[in-house]
Amino acid sequence: MTVESTAARKPRRSAAGKTGTTGARRATAKKPTDGRPELVQLLTPEGKRVKNAEYDPFVADITPDELRGLYRDMVLTRRFDAEATSLQRQGELGLWASLLGQEAAQIGSGRATREDDYVFPTYREHGVAWCRGVDPTNLLGMFRGVNNGGWDPNKNNFHLYTIVIGSQTLHATGYAMGIAKDGADSAVIAYFGDGASSQGDVAEAFTFSAVYNAPVVFFCQNNQWAISEPTEKQTRVPLYQRAQGFGFPGVRVDGNDVLACLAVTKWALERARRGEGPTLVEAYTYRMGAHTTSDDPTRYRHDDERVAWEAKDPIARLRGYLESETDTNEGFFAELEAESEALGRRVREVVRAMPDPDHFAIFENAYADGHALVDEERAQFADYQASFADVDEEEGK
């Protein structure tokens, strides 16, 4: 199934008479008959290949080894994510934002980027970080409270995680405008969620990128829930259709289909590199776990919803295809399981070797010259911390 890209109905032409940013390639619209949303899909939930004349060329030369590589990426990313969640529950991390269920969207889009492309993530793009060569253990220092990021953004062209919702889309747009002025043959991709799409920063980024024809791909992972707020409470039209109002194409892709995410993102990035401007990709997926480890999703959504999405699991989907259509044997899956366990052990060892966070660092940089109220709050917090020492001493006796 495919969906029509939401380029403007009549291509705008430049003074030279060439098609401008809105003259993008159009996919053939096909409306589903079973109530499912219109989207680009190359692999069904059962792992069956779906032909698509629009996007097949972008994965036509993919080899079985490369397919196994995508599967490995998703499995190891999920294992890392599960270990980080466990470490938070054990008190080793202050917070964790899980990507469970979104592996295909992140690995597919991440593997579509080139080394010279630049990525602006939110705080959940652990799979994209993996694709960009960032050591997963470097993602954990911020969540333990011992650093503000843990990696050099320019080493991997992967920006530090952004906690402020939606602001990274503006950063990405500005960077992309700079690329265009420099005449560089590269592109930018900005990640955000369905909740961030309601932020003014995102609308501003759309406006600037369209007007200045910036080489940027806006990759929205619509995981159905902005914490406890469902998508239908945020928009009256599918998110990808919003691009039409800004004058550039939008396309919705099956976010649990790693092949489709790879193909669509390649198309969008190549379009940006050709000077055809921005694209909005809506990866229609599902957040299988909590928004973060401080959230309780059972308070606002039903178990049957999760069960329905479990049947669309991105890893099981690609495994089915590998088993039925390639020469992948059980030895590969066994070796990957061992590698997965080794990764989990390494993550545990690295985190437990990290220093404890400085509990008082938060007070040091609030004001350049100090402040009476901050001094008072620091003293109150010191008394609070000391109260735990008294309890520990009593328990020791």
Image (spheres, helix red, strand yellow):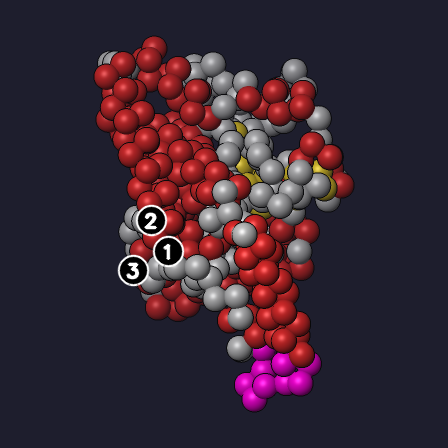
Of labels 1 and 3, the one closer to you: 1
Q: Secondary structure at mark 3?
A: helix
- Label 1 – label 3 distance at C-alpha: 22 Å
Image: 315 above or below 179: above
Q: Position of residue 127 (x, y in %)?
A: 41, 41
Q: Amino acid at mark 1?
A: Met
Which residue does the numbered mark 3 point to in the structure image?
155
Judge from the rendering whether residue 153 lies leftward or rightward of residue 219; answer left or right. Answer: left
Q: Toward the viewer: 271 or 36?
A: 36
Is residue 339 visible in the rendered structure shown here? yes
- The label on residue 350 is 2
Instruction: Name the quadrant containing residue 8.
Output: top right
- Magenta region's main secondary structure? loop
The mark found on residue 354 in the picture is: 1
Type of amino acid under label 3: Lys
Element class at badge 2 = helix
In this view, which residue lies farthest toward the top? 324
Cα separation, mark 1 vs mark 2, equals: 6 Å
Q: Which residues are magenta?
A: 366-375
Quadrant in the picture for residue 50 = top left
